[in-house]
Each structure stands twice: as C-alpha cells, then as structure tokens.
Image (cartoon, grey):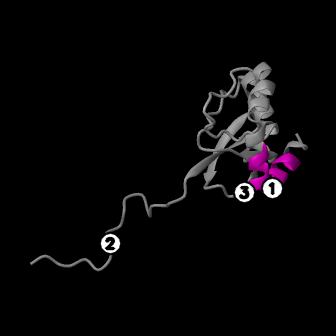
Amino acid sequence: MAQELTTPPAQKGGPVQSNYLHPYACFRCRKSFKRGSREAAVLPCPECGGPSIGLTRKFKPPKQTDEKQWEKVEALVRRGFLFWSLGEPYPDTLREVADFAERHANFIAQERARQPEAYRQIDAALSLT
C-alpha cells in the first residue's frame, strides 16, 4: 500500500520563487544586471556602486564595448523609456531617439503620471551620471 505524502517533495534547486528577474542598467559600467522583481526603480550597481536603472524584461543590453548603443539606451531612459512594447521597434541609432521620443510623448507623460516616485528616483539617479 502506498504511503500518503503529507508534505510536497523537495524540489531540486530549492523552492521555486514567483519573482521575475528584471534588468538594471548601469551607464557608467555599460552593464546590465538581473535583480528580483522590481525591487526599486534604482539600485546601486554591484560593479561601481553608481546608480543602475530598473528596466522591463524586454530590455536586451548591448555589448559592453558598444559605446554608441549604450549612449542610445541612456538617451532613451533619460527621456523616460524603460523598454516596454510600443507597437514599433526602438530606434537603431542615437540620431533617431528624438523623433521616437516625440512620437511617444503622450505615452511617456502617462507613465510618468502613473509612477511619479519611480521616475523621481530615475531622474535623480541620472542627474548624478
């Protein structure tokens, strides 16, 4: 006769966490680090201690050596873009950022109104870099 289990069996690798990992980008180091589900809008970079900005899971960081792409990413974040799906691809170059930001200005205004504290933290952190 089979024994009834009173507790679930242990899972390989420990308990399953429901938190997603989100990228945080450091523009000083030009690196992205995954952190637990949106702990804060800004966290210290584990490399340099400077600010790292929380982005959406859709963000794919450029190579650390690709300075032009990191400049473009920083320009987008400074304009309020945290890498949501917007119905069109994000710009390929820094030169295209201003027009892209203008096309999505209403969306960014709504996001800033919806999350004022997060954007206050992001704006304050970016003023340090």
Q: Residue furthest left?
A: 1
Amino acid marked by disc 1: Pro
Instruction: Determine whether 31 is above or below 8 in the image.
Output: above
- Residue 111 in percent (x, y) is at 74, 48
Q: Distance from label 3 to label 1 (Cα)?
A: 13 Å
Prevailing secondary structure of the magenta residues = helix
Amino acid marked by disc 2: Pro
Classify mark 2: helix, strand or loop.
Answer: loop
Residue at 62 percent across and 27 percent down: it is 89
Q: Is residue 124 magenta?
A: yes
Q: Mark 3 or mark 1, which is nearer to you?
A: 1
Amino acid marked by disc 3: Ala
Task: Determine which quarter of the picture holds residue 103.
Answer: top right
Q: Mark 2 packing: few (<14 Cα in 10 Å), some, or many (20+)? A: few
Q: Which residue is mark 2?
A: 8
- Residue 13 in percent (x, y) is at 42, 58
Residue 40 visible in the current orientation: yes
Q: Which residue is mark 3?
A: 40
Q: Which residue is mark 1?
A: 116
Q: Mark 1 or mark 2, which is nearer to you?
A: 1
Q: Which residues are magenta?
A: 109-125
Instruction: Determine whether 96 is above or below 26 in the image.
Output: above
For marks 1 and 2 on the same chain, the one whose residue lies earlier in the sequence: 2
